[in-house]
Image (cartoon, helix red, strand yellow):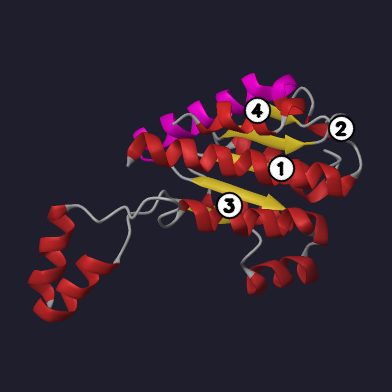
Amino acid sequence: MNYISELVERYPELVSCQSQITAAKDAIVNLYQNGGKILICGNGGSCADSEHMIGELMKGFLKKRPVNEALAQKLISIRKEDGALLAKSLQTPLRAVSLCGMPSLGTATINDIGANFTYAQQALGLTDPGDIFLGISASGNAVNIHLAAITAKALGALLVGLTGNDGGKMNGMYDVLIKVPEKIVYKVQELHLAVYHAICLDVEETFF
């Protein structure tokens, strides 16, 4: 099933950014084919969206995603019964990290450097060339996300953005920018949820 096509059928207003949604999905598929990871961040509701997206990527979404046989056998060889339980229970992740979920580092950065640098500091420590930095900002103008995106890009990451119809500071810097056709924050966020669900579903379909 093509979940992005189904998304646009349910939300016809998203036809205006369908090509960008597809481009983001294709970039993520290419990322995982090459062993990379996604770094995701946002503020407020978009922070919750970052964590939500991690949950769809790092374990099964609609599919069970069993671990591969080689890993299963390694687990069993370490501790037979416990390894067998792990091999049966664990689900294969698509590697992703939420920059919203590191309170000790985040608060240390706020205290020692400044609040606007929290995500940039994490991006500096975690970004590998070829990774994807996914910034979520309804306005496109969140300073901490903007500075983190610059940092990640300098380290060789591809930038993917989710924003509203203006785009703000994200314009002209992101490699793929999905601008949903709303400007009121809660309406932007409602569409963002539908968009990243469809992307995660299509990526999962590709690999599993």
Q: Percent position (x, y) of residue 173? A: 73, 26
| Rendering coords of residue 91 (x, y %) | 33, 59
Identify the secondary structure beneath mark 1: helix
Residue that appears at 77% across and 41% down: 146
Residue identified by numbered label 3:
53
| Residue situated in front as seen by the camera: 33 or 14 | 14
Say whether residue 153 is visible: yes
Is residue 107 found inside the magenta-colored segment of the image? no
Instruction: Specify the label residue 8 is tagged with.
Output: 4
Q: Nearer the viewer, mark 2 or mark 3?
A: 3
Q: Is residue 57 left or right of residue 23?
A: left
Q: Residue at x 20, y 74 (%)?
A: 85
Give the CA separation, mark 3 to mark 1: 11 Å
Considering the numbered disc 4 on the image, is that residue within a helix, a strand or a loop? helix
Nearer mark to the viewer, of 2 and 1: 1
In the rendered structure, which disc, 4 or 2, sits on the residue that comes first in sequence?
4
Residue range (magenta)? 15-35
- The reply to whether callout 3 and callout 1 are in contact (CB within 8 Å) is no
Residue 153 falls left or right of residue 72: right
Circle 1 Cα neighbour tier, 10 Å, few/some/many (<14 / 14–19 / ≥20): many
Query: Which of the two discs, 4 and 2, sits closer to the camera?
Result: 4
What amino acid type should be assigned to the residue bearing mark 3? Met
Residue type marked 1: His
Q: Quadrant of residue 14?
A: top right
Mark sitting earlier along the chain (2/1): 2
Q: Which residue occupies 28% across, 68% down?
A: 89
Q: CA distance from mark 2 to mark 1?
A: 16 Å
| Residue wearing tag 1 | 192
Give the percent coordinates (x, y) of residue 176: 64, 26
The quadrant of the rendering that contains the N terminus is top left
